[in-house]
Image (cartoon, helix red, strand yellow):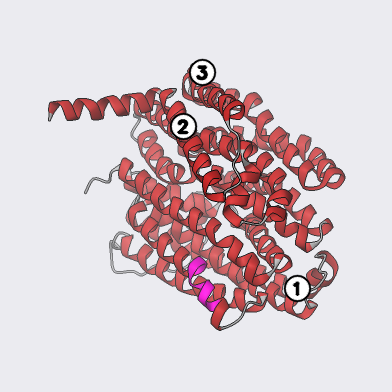
Amino acid sequence: MAISFRNNVAANYASQLYVTLIGIAVLPQYVAYMGAEAFGLVGFFTMLQMWFQLLDMGMTPTLARETARFRGGAIDANSLRRLLRSLEGIFCAIGLVGAGILIINSHTVAGSWLNVQKLPLEEVDHALMLMALIVALRWISGLYRGAIGAFERQVWLGGFNVVIASIRFILVIPFFVYVGTSPTEFFLFQFGVAIVELGVLVIKTYRLLPPLSGKAGITWEWAPVRTVLGFAVSVALTNWVWVLLTQTDKLVLSKYLPLTDYGYFTLGVLVASAVTLVAGPISVALVPRLTRLVAAGNDSGVVDLYRNATQMVAVIAVPAALVLALFSEQVLWVWTGNAELSRQAAPVLRLYAIGNCVLAIGSFPYYLQVAKGDLKLHLLGSLVFLLLLIPGLLWATLRYGATGAGYAWIAANTLYFFMWVPLVHRRFLRGLHLDWMTRDVGAIAVTGLAGAAALQWWISWPHSRMSVAAIIIVSGLFLLALTAAGSSWARDLVGLKKHSQLAG
């Protein structure tokens, strides 16, 4: 049965949009029920999940790539099953060890790392123990998500993500009302959800796996991992560099900011993450399809898909980033109704939204290298920028706090975009970069920026939250229309629909 790339992208977007919006919508409720300081623990938990990715060792992307290669005919069913069984054993072992280390050190983190002011240290200690278990379970779930995505079952995965997000974000509100609002109670609820999530993903993955050829069962062995170790190590090193670049500021601020201020910082960063989430649904569908085209030797198909996907992300990411950057305080005020919270979090939202937009578009050369199975250039570039930028990031964060971290984030992504992306294109898609920069990115960005300048000059803000919300929505749609007008892919899509209607 043919699987539609467009349907997969639509399903990814629908589920990701729901998960993002519902997650953002309930955050003010979290702050209201838990308090800003307790919400700072939620921010620490989010950061902890990212650092736990250091333990992945490139195994999840490797399994996803091998699954896509199986579907393209490059490997057989038994090889895929053996690889999954081997990775399952490694994941479970690492997850248990990682969670154990976090649990053992929870008291030290609560008392010596976090700047707790009002919460009882015993309460924070218990919350940290639960965090360790949840992080391990969600990390293991990622292995099965990678496999399901590589089977291009994004429609099912999107629906499942909607259900889990609804339980995680919405059902916790009545839990607050009828059970309790302490950090321990909140993370106990999330622990139960993580168990259910992992169980369902395991069952779905095994239903998608091809049947065994032969009567022999599959046992754990190291050999299947050895065959893909080179690619896995390349991805692992890339992920380590990625985590260091994206999470160092958050780790440093969790040490030096009071937990309440860290909660404000977390709010700004989480809202700004909506920009990078724009690229997520497309990349989940893009990488398996690109991998299949590469395996089939369809070079023209690779270029067309790569360019169209870039424009899809740019058309949405640019207006989203501009709205959040230009109207950061207004967006936060409409969302929370809390003027003080909006004022505190707005500078962080503004800076991280801009940096995340550059990141979302600049990630496409990485997707190309994953599909090609060659991450040497990406790894080299990431290491170079890591050595250059981490000292600057630490200096900016320690000296200027959350604002310094935001400026460093913009600088890091901008330098990488303009200095290293051209080299990647020259290596893998020679002759493409100029057209990619001018037609696929530049035309969209310029139209968006021109519209943003006009809005800055024209808008006068009213005092009603509903009126402010209406202006923000209309401005976003206006910028979306402009960026779509600057995209050849969007113009062609509209033209095809009009032609179809006329033909009908």
Amino acid type, residue under disc 3 in the picture: Thr
Quick one: SS at disc 3?
helix
Distance between the Cα atoms at labels 1 and 3? 50 Å
Helix, strand or loop: magenta stretch? helix
In the picture of the structure, the residue carrying the numbered disc 3 is: 438
Q: Label 1: how many residues lie within 10 Å, few (<14), some (14-19) or many (20+)?
A: many
Sequence order check: which comes first, mark 2 or mark 3? 3
**Quarter occupied by residue 111:** bottom right
438 lies left or right of 259 = left
User: Percent position (x, y) of residue 235?
Assistant: 57, 45
In the picture of the structure, the residue carrying the numbered disc 1 is: 106
User: Percent position (x, y) of residue 56?
Assistant: 59, 56
In the picture of the structure, the residue carrying the numbered disc 2 is: 478
Of badges 1 and 3, the one in the foreground is 3
Residue range (magenta): 168-175
Q: Label 3: how many residues lie within 10 Å, few (<14), some (14-19) or many (20+)?
A: few
